[in-house]
């Protein structure tokens, strides 16, 4: 995937990995950066179910921020800290996937499933096309 510009003007290069056996997956998130890790089917990033969007002005252009409200089975949630975790007794929990994370996941889902999303997703929807050539985009913040 191409690098994408965050709202903090930091270029982010998405990296994709494959977990073949999710039952043996033992993530170790950095508690300073991550509260929870959760699993959702990649094709859900192409569905209009739970999808909404917000248009914002950033970098002198209108950008569409995609939001996904997802329900996650409790067995597919990994916490950075188990302290005061009220969700342990719940069978599922709701999360919101938004911003740069949602833009990256929609792009990955489009490539993996060779399909378009059920909602509008185009050049105005993300921060990759800023008019700079690829070399400049990759090397100059």
Image (cartoon, rainbow, N blue to C red):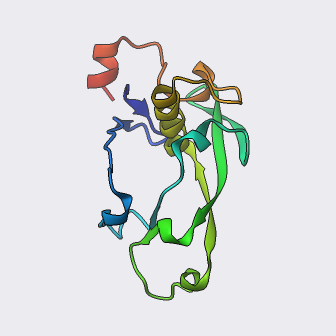
- In the displayed structure, 13 sits above or below 31; it is above
Q: Residue at x 46, y 33 (%)?
A: 108
Residue 96, how many percent across, how many down?
Answer: 62, 56
Residue 39 x %, y %: 48, 57
Whether residue 20 is visible, yes or no, is yes
Q: Position of residue 46 (x, y in %)?
A: 62, 35
Identify the residue at horizontal 64%, vertical 26% (top origin): 121
Q: Quadrant of residue 54?
A: top right
Residue at 52 percent of width and 43 percent of height: 42
Taking the image as shown, residue 99 lies to the left or right of residue 3, namely right
Question: Which quarter of the image is occupied by the N terminus?
Answer: top left
Q: Which residue appears farthest toward the bottom when viewing the image?
A: 84
Q: Say whether residue 29 is visible.
A: no
Residue 106 position within the rendered picture, expressed as x and y whole percent measured from the top left? 54, 35
For the point 40% across and 14% down, the residue is 132
Residue 94 position (above or below residue 8)? below
How many numbered dots are placed on residues in this image? 0
Give the quarter of the figure containing the C terminus.
top left
Q: Quadrant of residue 122?
A: top right
* Most foreground residue, 98 or 57: 98
- Left or right: 44, with 12 as reference point: right
The one nearer the camera, 22 or 47, is 22
């Amino acid at each position: 995937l191409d690098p994408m510009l965050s709202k903090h003007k930091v270029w982010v290069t998405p990296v994709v990995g494959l977990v073949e056996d999710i039952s043996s997956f033992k993530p170790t998130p950095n508690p300073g950066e991550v509260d929870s890790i959760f699993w959702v089917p990649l094709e859900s990033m192409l569905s209009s179910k739970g999808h909404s969007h917000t248009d914002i002005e950033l970098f002198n252009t209108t950008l569409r921020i995609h939001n996904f409200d997802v329900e996650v089975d409790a067995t597919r949630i990994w916490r950075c800290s188990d302290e005061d975790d009220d969700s342990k007794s719940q069978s599922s929990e709701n999360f919101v996937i938004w911003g740069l994370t949602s833009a990256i996941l929609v792009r990955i889902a489009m490539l993996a499933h060779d399909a378009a999303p059920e909602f509008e997703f185009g050049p105005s929807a993300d921060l990759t096309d800023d008019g700079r050539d690829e070399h400049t985009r990759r090397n100059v913040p």
